[in-house]
Image (cartoon, rainbow, N blue to C red):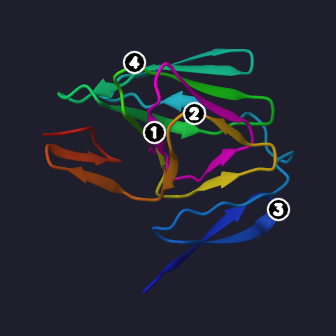
Amino acid sequence: MIRFQTLWCRGLQKILCAAGITTTVLWNIDLWANAQVISSQDSVHTQVTQQDNQFEIFGGTVTDSETLLFHSFEQFNLERGQTAEFYVAPDIEAVFSRITNGIPSRINGHIELTGSAASLYLINPAGVLFGAESSINLAGDFTVLTAERLDFSQGNFDLSGHPTG
């Protein structure tokens, strides 16, 4: 059975999202300002530096096998003309990026992954909304999840914690 949750956007626009299912919505994003990519202050150690409209994303936590990279963001929103660029080591096969603030992410800018052919997983239980100006550039797969936790054989990646195992 699919449960629906209602998300309210500026102007009281109602968007229905199926819980646990990726939702892609196109809309006019000119209404919001101050979009930012902010790292969470936790043990995952994601580092974000901003120069003008460019957010450079480094650090994170690598698994023992050194093929999985985890990032944690308090907020992940991009306006038109903004770019979030993930810098990744060549041996990384997958990048898991969680958003922890409980608010849907709004992407109307560009997401890019540099240095590896890794897949990128963007995880926000509250949802991710894509605008008409959004774009993605990476060699691997791109997946958006509304999961609250990912379980791995060595541990889990929870929105309230960090990789364990």
Q: Label 4 is placed on what type of residue?
A: Ala
Residue 95 against residue 90 in the figure, above or below: below
Residue 109 on the magenta segment: yes
Instruction: Point out the frontmost of discs 1 and 3.
Output: 1
Which label number is shown at residue 77?
none
Residue 5 position, x and y percent, is 55, 74
Of mark 1 and mark 4, the one earlier in the sequence is 4
| Residue 46, picture quadrant | top left
Front-most of residues 27 and 85: 85
Magenta residues, start to end = 97-121
Instruction: Point out the frontmost of discs 3 and 2.
Output: 2
Q: Which residue is mark 2?
A: 138
Cβ atoms under marks 4 and 2 closer than 8 Å? no
Q: Label 2 is placed on what type of residue?
A: Leu
Q: Which residue is mark 3?
A: 11
* Location of the C terminus (image quadrant): top left
Q: Which residue is mark 4?
A: 89
